[in-house]
Amino acid sequence: MSKVSSKIVQEDFNDLRAVVHYTKAAHRIGLWESERILIERFFPDKSARLLEAGCGAGRVSVALGEAGYKNLMAFDFAEELLAQAHSLAIERKANITFFHADATKLEKCHLLSDTLFDGALFMFNGLMQIPSRRNRRRALRSIASFCRPGAPLIFTTHDRDDSPSERVLWRLEAARWAKGKQDPILREFGDRYYEEEGVGRTFMHLPVREEILADLKATGWSHTFDAMRRLIASEPRKVRDFSDECRFWVATRN
């Protein structure tokens, strides 16, 4: 069996079920309260030049445009989601430059030549939906290369040791890996690839905190802040139904 790859993940996000799911969220949910708090804290200047990686159907970028942020660029590698983001921006009259790109290969995007951003976002666990740690580090380096020194990056992860039930599940998974009985499509311990009703197939890597700290240090970023979402804001039911508990990270470009 082939290992999960960026091509498989791209196909999953272009699947009609995923497109409908994320488009509904962009239209009905918008920014989470926790996202709004951190964006306002770390990006107080609404004229700052910001880059959103993995923008999906535009949930975050369009909300930022509506909130008055004036210099926004956003990209995704799933063409169908990107088309939805562009349509939503037109509908909401949000001035955003959308473009198709792979976060691990931004240097190949001519649109970004000679561009330095004042900050970047990679929201809703987008970074963790890149298969293989090597490629996630490649994405972090790629984004760093287009950010000025001192620029913040906000992103999220799901912790695999956040709750007692998760710790039990991952102890069982560790035993499977030790015996070589893990799902053969997975690349690394911490990976999940699962079917979700109404969404389709989803790949996700669940790290531990130490893993992310090491990745930031290795890719040109300094850790600035991290906290679980519940400690930042109490989210309404629609957000909790859309996303499980996650950890927010803020790092600063070296």
Image: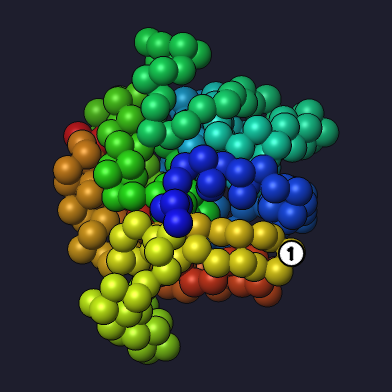
Type of residue at label 1? Gly
Q: Compare residues 187 and 33 and report the one nearer the observer.
A: 187
Q: Is residue 72 left or right of residue 131?
A: right
Residue 21 drawn at (x, y percent): 73, 56
Residue at the spot 67% in from the left edge and 43% down from the top edge: 14
Q: In this view, does 121 lie to the left or right of 134?
A: right
Q: Which image quarter is the N terminus in?
A: bottom left
Circle 1 crowding by C-alpha within 10 Å: few under 14, some 14–19, many from 20: few
Q: Compare residues 158 and 95 and report the one nearer the observer.
A: 158
Q: Could you tell me if residue 127 is visible in this image?
A: no
Residue 175 drawn at (x, y percent): 28, 83
Residue at the spot 49% in from the left edge and 72% down from the top edge: 245
Q: Point out the residue furthest to the front here.
A: 1
Q: In this view, does 92 lie above or below 131?
A: above
Please name the residue that numbered disc 1 is placed on: 198
Question: How has the structure been colored for display?
Answer: rainbow
Label 1 residue SS: loop
Q: Could you tell me if residue 1 is visible in this image?
A: yes
Q: Quadrant of residue 163?
A: bottom left
Looking at the image, how many numbered discs can be counted on the residues?
1
Residue 165 drawn at (x, y percent): 42, 88
Q: Which image quarter is the C terminus in?
A: top left
Q: Is residue 193 left or right of residue 174?
A: right
Residue at the spot 44% in from the left edge and 51% down from the top edge: 2
Q: Is residue 185 above or below residue 177?
A: above
Residue 134 drawn at (x, y percent): 27, 44
Q: Point out the residue furthest to the right here.
A: 91
Q: In which quarter of the image is residue 232?
A: bottom left
